[in-house]
Image (cartoon, rainbow, N blue to C red):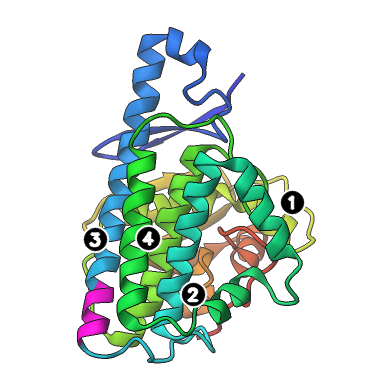
Amino acid sequence: MIRFRKISYSEVTYSVALHVELLLSRPLRADKQRYNAVVAQIEVFLTNLERETSRVVQLIEDAKRRSLFSAPTKATPWTVKDQITHLAYFDEMAELTLTDPDAFDDKIRLDENSATSICESVRLRYSELSNAETQEWFFRSRSSLLSTLSTGQLPRRVSWFGPAMSPISLLVSRTMESWAHGFDIAETTGLQVAESTSLKDVCDIGYRTFANSFITNGLEVPESEVFVILTLPWGEVLRFGHPESLDKVEGPAKDFALVVTQRKSFERTSLVIQGDVAHEWMAVAQCFAGPPGDRRRS
């Protein structure tokens, strides 16, 4: 049985199945109403990834036009170009796990033999690409991934760099990564690009990785839940959890997204945090796979 958490948004209600075990499986196909609902859900998440891609493309084109690919970002020692090659590489890996899981597993095993972390290995491996090659690689890999995701012919589960996940979770993780690395680029170049509905997905995955944030840091997962109230730039309000909870996080959705993607510490945001569990969570929040990140303090 799948457990659903319903998150009501003004323009659409996401029925987010935690890990969506039966995604597009035969029993689901037999139930036309449920099948159509899941397909519609995929389309919503896919639209948000497309919107976030448009934002990143604007940032990349601006950086190239102003010769800023070599500019250092606050994610020392990463440059703007490193941020782009990171996105391109993991887009390719995302498509590979969707289309050829055995090849994906083989490549993971090769990367595991590296003396450096996978992210650092990718950064060093592709650092000699020209600016034009870097831009073209991202455009090609993202376009191909979007095409694969839009076919609807998706497996029930896919391997990744952490636990296996549903294709929807993989899709949303690409949106989150695009938003986070796009922020790194924008912070460096100074170009402001209006937020889109993709910010909702970043906040959603940030909330859903509550338990994993503690597990990743070797901490016991608290039993109490945190109620989260976030305001999007256009005034829409997102709510996660139970209003009766004594632990709360409230404030701008972008600030919450910056914390869970580890772009800012919660102390340097406008978030209002109430309760010990909420404070503990915000101190270790991490919505991406892998070991504990090197949290930024600025």
The disc, 1 or 3, on the residue closer to the chain's N-terminal end is: 3
Determine whether the residue tagged by mark 3 lies in a helix, strand or loop. helix
Label 2 is placed on what type of residue?
Arg
Q: How far apart are labels 2 and 1 at the CA level?
A: 23 Å
Number of the front mark, 2 or 1: 2
The disc, 3 or 4, on the residue closer to the chain's N-terminal end is: 3
The disc, 2 or 1, on the residue closer to the chain's N-terminal end is: 1
The disc, 2 or 3, on the residue closer to the chain's N-terminal end is: 3
Q: Residues within 10 Å of mark 3 (few under 14, many from 20)?
A: some
Between 294 and 134, the one nearer to me in the picture: 134
Label 4 is placed on what type of residue?
Ala
Label 3 is placed on what type of residue?
Ser
- Residue drawn where x is 37% and y is 83% of the image: 130
Q: How far apart are labels 3 and 4 at the CA level?
A: 20 Å
The x and y percentages for residue 153 are 42, 29
Label 1 is placed on what type of residue?
Val
Q: Are marks 2 and 4 in contact (CB under 8 Å)?
A: no
Q: How far apart are labels 2 and 4 at the CA level?
A: 14 Å
Q: How far apart are labels 1 and 3 at the CA level?
A: 37 Å
Between 196 and 162, the one nearer to me in the picture: 162
The disc, 4 or 1, on the residue closer to the chain's N-terminal end is: 1
Secondary structure that dominates the magenta span: helix
The x and y percentages for residue 24 are 47, 23
Q: Which residues are magenta?
A: 59-65
Determine whether the residue tagged by mark 1 lies in a helix, strand or loop. loop
The residue where tag 2 is placed is 263
Q: Residues within 10 Å of mark 2 (few under 14, many from 20)?
A: many
The residue where tag 4 is placed is 253
Number of the front mark, 2 or 4: 2
